[in-house]
Every structure is written in C-alpha cells, then in structure tokens.
Image: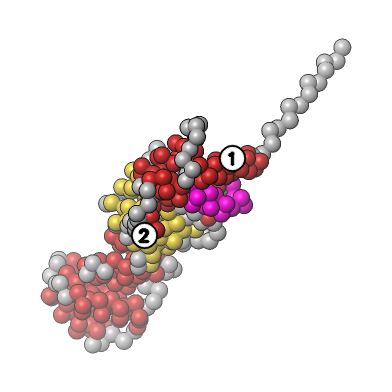
Amino acid sequence: DAEGLKLFKQGNDALAQDKFEEALKCFTDSLKSVADENARSVVFGNRSICLRRLGRLEEALKDADQCVALDPKNAKGYLRQVQVYLGMSKWAEAYRQADLGLQCDSKERDAMLEKAWRKAALEMLQGSWVGCVHKDLGGYEQTFTFRGETDLDIEVLGRAVPGGFALEYGTPPVLNLRPGWAPPVRYLFELKGDTLRICCGVDGADPVALAGPGLCEMKKGSSAEAQPDPSLAGLSQVQLIAKFCDQLVAALKDVPRSGTQDSSVMQLQTIVHQLEQKFPPRTVQQAMFLVTNDCGELHDDVAPAVASLREALKEYQEKEASQDPPPEATPEATPEAP
C-alpha cells in the first residue's frame, strides 16, 4: 500500500502539471497495489480525469463508473461521470448523474456538480415543449421555447410572449419563469428524456410537489398544426357560418362550472381558438359579427344557428355572473353619542 500511495501522489503531481500520460501510468501502477475500496475509488476517479483529458472518453467513463461503484457516497465519482457525459454531449445521462451526485452526503463538490447539472439541464431544455394545463386552470395548450441560458418564448392560444427563465437546483428543482412583464412564476419541474413535467402553485400559493391541478406534462416539439376538417370541404360561406355557430354552441355546453371564473374564461378562449384553427378566418369573423350585432333579417340557412349561439352565449354569461361572489354589505353608520 505504501508503494501504491507513493505512485498515487506522483500521479497527482503529474496531473497538476497537465502531464496526463505520465499521470495515467502512475495511477495505473498504483491500482496494482492499492487494496482499500475507498482508496481505489479515488485512484479510478483521478485516472478518469487523465483519460478524459487525453480524449479517451469511453475508457474515462469506465473508470468513473468504477469510482462510483466502489464508493457510491463519493460525490467526486459522480462529477467524473458527468464530466465525461458532457464531453460526449450525452445531456440526459449527465443530468441524471449530476442529480444523484448532488444527493450524496458529501458537500465537498456540490458547487461543481451543480454547475454541471445546470449545463446539462440547459442543453436538455433547449427548443420547444408543448403541453396542456389542467382543465381546472383552463385546459389550454401552451408552448415553451427555451433559447440559450435565460431567454424563453411562451405561446398560449396562438399568442407569443417573450420572457425569461432561471434554474434553481433543489429536490425537486425549480424553474422560475418570467412571462413578459408579468410577475415571475415559480414551477417545480422534472426532466426525463423528451418529457418535461412542471407544476405551478394554485390561487397564489407556491407549489410544494409535482401533483395537483398545477401539474402540466409537456413533450419536446412544437404544437401540431391544425389539420383541415374534411367535413368543411365544399361548404358555402353561409353553411360554414352555420356550422361554426353550431359547434361553438355544443362546446359551450361542455365548459365545466367547477373551476374559477378565470379558468372558465380560459376554457372558453381555448374552445374559440381551436375553432379558429379549424375554420377559415373569414368565417369566424363573419359569424362573430352576426352574433354580436343586430344585422336585421338573416339568411334562412344561418339564422337558427346564429340565434342558438346568441342564446348560448347569454346563458354562459349569466352562469358566469352567478358565480361572482356577492358584494360585501355596506355596514350601517353608527350614530354618534349625544
């Protein structure tokens, strides 16, 4: 063991001087006489550094794996794995091992591991993610597009808002989003492959777990473009307007009344947006104009549908108004004592 320790120190001296070939030989010879598992873990970890710096990444990974296997509580071992995975551009593996390393009892390398975790997370997040929020919060589809280390575009119901983001390590980690000029929104998140699970708080509270109505599962990629509805082919403009009105009436009946007024409004906006994607813009514009304006006598093929939609919207608004909290009673003035 004394000889092994001597060779190990020589290897460290050579490594400090960037003499990687010399250090590699010293560490390899040291392993022949070092028996203690924890000590061997350290030697494998340092030899992994040499191999990585020499560009021998597959061998470096094997040594890093040995380092962790011999001493699973050695945070440095996870750091060695992460450094190799980053060199291989294997972001998911680097992210996973960095997370495991940060959960070790040892705090010695936390700063370096957290930096590596952040780099891997940023690489995995790049690009667009799409998913639908819980129906209690509106049920709408949202797209997040991450660019670089801080830039974020948020698209909801066809409207894009530039913003920003910041990562914060934790268990689970935190994704702080800044949508435009609005206040930051704190999300817990879990990142696995092409799935990003995020969870915000509800009713102004901070999230405490990846569960509940604030949870949204997002997939890597962009929102699918709306496909033409074959049932609309060959219809006249009058028939298209009538069909739009009928479908909006049917959709309004399906809007639940269990959520907040804001979520109900978002659900209605989601429905209208989906129909806007499905029908020609001119049809949507003309239909809404006929519904919201007194245009006199309408064509027989469209009048019943417009009337039904007017009635459905009126009923919807009345139900929404009935959900508003009653105004606070004004206390009567207390007469002054004589």
Which one is in front, 185 or 328? 328
**Residue pictured at 19% horizontal, 74% vertical:** 57
239 on left or right of 122: right
Counting from the top left corner in percent of width and height, residue 164 is at: 35, 46
**Front residue of 291 and 107:** 291
Q: Residue furthest right?
A: 338
Q: Secondary structure at mark 2?
A: helix
The residue drawn where x is 37% and y is 52% is: 235
- Residue 53 image offset from top left, x and y in percent: 17, 69
Secondary element type, mark 1: helix
Image quadrant in which you'd find residue 314: top right
Q: Residues within 10 Å of mark 1 (few under 14, many from 20)?
A: few
Q: Is residue 234 left or right of residue 331?
A: left
Query: Magenta stretch?
Result: 244-262
Which amino acid, by three-letter code, is at mark 1? Answer: Lys
Secondary structure, magenta segment, majority class: helix
> Residue tagged by mark 1?
314
